Image (cartoon, helix red, strand yellow):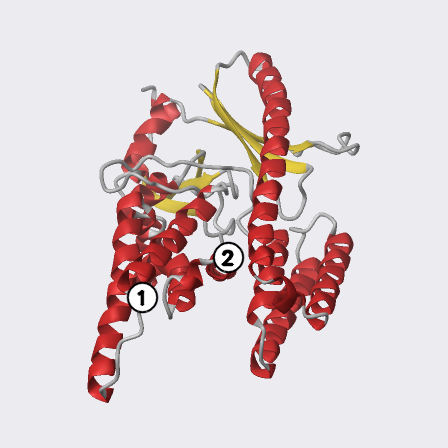
């Protein structure tokens, strides 16, 4: 998930009671909720394949989360000890309280990341197996509303804080308007924008009525329960999409006399009735759209990529020696490949993860084109 969602969840769990464990617990919770994304430090290398290799790696695992959850309160207490000693004042932080708050908040990060189709590898460094929830889109405005509304009611107590929250709301609203006008990612942009603005108005009205001061911690607990209810609803819809898509995938496999190997139904942005379905058979990988609402008659937008034949597998094997391909294949869940280029000089193997995109030079971050020298490609005209 995005770091705004992680930060808001960290703040809400703090306001739900973790901030009582020790002074400074709120700051620790927000930082701990984002701590596993420390793997973004590899972006300094300027190489996206190095970043892809390490992102959602060991820092998102059970072991990494424990280390980060312990390291953060240790760092806080060491800094406070040094400051308190230099100023000759008593220490205020309680290590045990900070430790418990940090571990809980840090654990929310891989949990939140597991819910989407990017996945996590919880058993690193011993196992690199990916696990996917597949029921929450990687960026979800409703998650922002649920967590952000509760956090604002409980944490906006001064004019400065209210102003900062207002700037955040304005920035996110501007981003949503931009996406709605310039992208096709939102299926119902007007409905989403109207719902967002209405939610902002209602939250501001509740704050004006001093709901945060009147109700206190129950608001945070209610937000967490509402988030769980929302996730439960999406899980039910995911099961329906998986069942519907499996029927279509079985039909496609039967038409081509193929054996169905695995499949996944994945959410789309702010559209609980629209799911992207990917299925792999022994001969190909398919992707199509699944609609759970009354508009099921819309085009399924089917794409099919055949797996390489035996001669083409030699080319694929050569491409797999490239470190970029190795990093990509380590991440890819439904990899597909195709050949392109002029074999008179050079051919290319194009890779893509069909969860997100298709093969091609301009298909986005989750695709790769690897040049292979032509002698590696078998020419069917030479009689071999």
- Residue 286 in sight from this viewpoint: yes
Residue 364 has which mark?
A: none
Q: Which element is circle 2 on?
A: loop
Q: Which element is circle 1 on?
A: helix
Residue bearing the label numbered 1: 44
**Image spot of residue 269 (x, y percent):** 62, 48
Cα separation, mark 1 vs mark 2, equals 36 Å
The answer to which of 330 and 21 lies nearer the viewer is 21
Q: Residues within 10 Å of mark 1 (few under 14, many from 20)?
A: few
Q: Is residue 336 left or right of residue 266?
A: left
The answer to which of 294 and 281 lies nearer the viewer is 294
Residue 40 sits in which quadrant? bottom left
Which residue shows up at 25% across the image and 70% down it?
77
Q: Earlier in the sequence, mark 1 or mark 2?
A: 2
Residue 30 sits in which quadrant? bottom left
- Work out whether 261 lies above or below 361: above
- Work out whether 50 lies above or below 330: below
- Work out whether 76 lies above or below 10: below
**Image spot of residue 233 (x, y percent):** 63, 37
Which residue shows up at 61% across the image and 71% down it?
171
**Image spot of residue 104 (x, y percent):** 38, 52
Which residue shows up at 27% across the image and 76% down it?
91
- Residue 288 in sight from this viewpoint: no
The answer to which of 28 and 330 lies nearer the viewer is 28
- Work out whether 139 lies above or below 299: below
Number of residue marks? 2
- For the C terminus, the quadrant is top left
Q: Is residue 114 left or right of residue 57?
A: right
Q: Residues within 10 Å of mark 2 (few under 14, many from 20)?
A: many
**Image spot of residue 144 (x, y percent):** 59, 57
Residue bearing the label numbered 2: 16
């Amino acid at each position: 998930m995005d770091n705004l969602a992680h930060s808001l969840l960290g703040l809400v769990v703090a306001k739900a009671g973790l901030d009582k464990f020790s002074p400074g617990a709120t700051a620790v919770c927000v930082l701990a909720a984002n701590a596993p994304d420390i793997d973004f430090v590899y972006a300094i290398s300027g190489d996206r394949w190095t970043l892809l290799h390490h992102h959602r790696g060991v820092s998102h695992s059970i072991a990494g989360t424990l280390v980060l959850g312990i390291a953060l309160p240790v760092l806080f207490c060491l800094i406070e000890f040094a400051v308190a000693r230099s100023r000759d004042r008593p220490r205020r932080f309680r290590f045990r309280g900070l430790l418990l708050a940090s571990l809980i908040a840090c654990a929310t990060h891989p949990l939140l990341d597991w819910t989407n189709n990017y996945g996590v590898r919880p058993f690193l460094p011993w196992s690199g197996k990916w696990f996917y929830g597949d029921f929450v889109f990687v960026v979800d405005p409703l998650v922002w509303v649920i967590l952000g509304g509760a956090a604002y009611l409980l944490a906006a107590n001064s004019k400065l804080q209210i102003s900062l929250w207002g700037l955040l709301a304005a920035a996110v609203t501007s981003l949503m308007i931009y996406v709605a006008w310039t992208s096709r990612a939102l299926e119902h942009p007007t409905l989403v924008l109207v719902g967002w603005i209405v939610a902002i108005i209602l939250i501001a009205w509740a704050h004006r009525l001093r709901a945060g001061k009147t109700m206190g911690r129950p608001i945070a607990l209610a937000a967490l329960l509402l988030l769980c209810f929302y996730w439960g609803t999406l899980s039910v819809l995911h099961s329906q999409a998986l069942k519907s898509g499996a029927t279509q995938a079985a039909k496609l496999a039967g038409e081509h006399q193929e054996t169905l190997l695995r499949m996944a139904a994945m959410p789309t942005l702010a559209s609980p009735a629209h799911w992207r379905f990917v299925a792999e058979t022994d001969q190909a990988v398919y992707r199509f759209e699944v609609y759970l609402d009354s508009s099921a008659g819309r085009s399924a937008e089917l794409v099919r990529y055949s797996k390489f034949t035996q001669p083409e597998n030699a080319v694929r094997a050569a491409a797999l020696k490239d470190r970029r391909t190795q990093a990509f294949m380590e991440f890819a869940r439904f990899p597909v490949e195709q050949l392109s280029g002029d074999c008179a000089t050079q051919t290319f193997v194009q890779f893509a993860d069909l969860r997100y995109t298709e093969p091609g030079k301009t298909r986005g971050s989750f695709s790769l084109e690897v040049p292979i020298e032509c002698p590696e490609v078998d020419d069917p005209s030479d009689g071999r």
